[in-house]
Amino acid sequence: MMEYTKILAAIDLTEESTQVLDRASSLAKLYSSQLDIVHIIEPLGYAYGGDIPMDLTEVQTQLEEHAKAFLEGVGKKYSIPSENQHVVIGRPETEIHRLAEDSASDLVVVGSHGRHGIQLLLGSTANGILHGAKCDVLAVRIQ
């Protein structure tokens, strides 16, 4: 049977992330594994094709600070030390794959909204993580 020694939970900053964290935390306890959490912030320029006539540095900094504060609260609730809390700027799939490899994680836990139709065709972050991961991926169905 596979023993997970390092689990990476990828979360957004919503109430729904507790469903992902509950599952990841339970698995971490079951296997006595280290649990890391990560939130990825997409660079604001990406969302608008990079041609915005204003400096978004301050907004980006506020997003980072908000994410760090959120992870700090979650870290306290789930006993995850600050060195295991990661806020990264980039494309979610790319950065989660990179962090999972760099930290030698053997399981990535991510939320999935179980979309249908056109949303399914367009793909989701969870799907992107699943297809490029070099370790196991658990998609937690968000209720």
Image: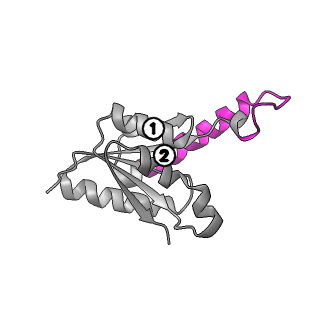
* CB contact under 8 Å: marks 1 and 2: yes
Where is residue 75? Give x, y as percent.
41, 48
Instruction: Tell me the residue at 82%/32% (across/down).
Output: 52
Describe the colour scheme in one phrase: one colour
- Relative vertical location of residue 92 with respect to residue 110 in this rendering, above or below: above
The answer to whether residue 39 shows anywhere in this view is: yes
Tally the marks. Answer: 2
Q: Which residues are magenta?
A: 47-75
Identity of the amino acid at label 2? Leu
| Tag of residue 8 | none
Marked residue nearer the N-terminal end (1 or 2): 2
Q: Nearer the viewer, residue 69 or 45?
A: 45
Where is residue 139? Give x, y as percent.
41, 60
Which quadrant of the rendered structure holds the N terminus?
bottom left
User: Horizontally, is 26 left or right of 30 in the view?
Assistant: right
- Relative vertical location of residue 102 with respect to residue 79 in this rendering, above or below: above
User: Horizontally, is 19 left or right of 33 in the view?
Assistant: right
The answer to whether residue 82 shows anywhere in this view is: no
Instruction: Tell me the residue at 71%/41% (across/down).
Output: 47
Identity of the amino acid at label 1? His
- Relative vertical location of residue 21 with respect to residue 46 in this rendering, above or below: below
- Let me know if residue 73 is in the magenta part: yes
| Tag of residue 86 | 1
Q: What main secondary structure does the magenta stretch of the protein show?
A: helix
Where is residue 83? Give x, y as percent.
37, 34
| Tag of residue 71 | 2
Q: Residues within 10 Å of mark 1 (few under 14, many from 20)?
A: some
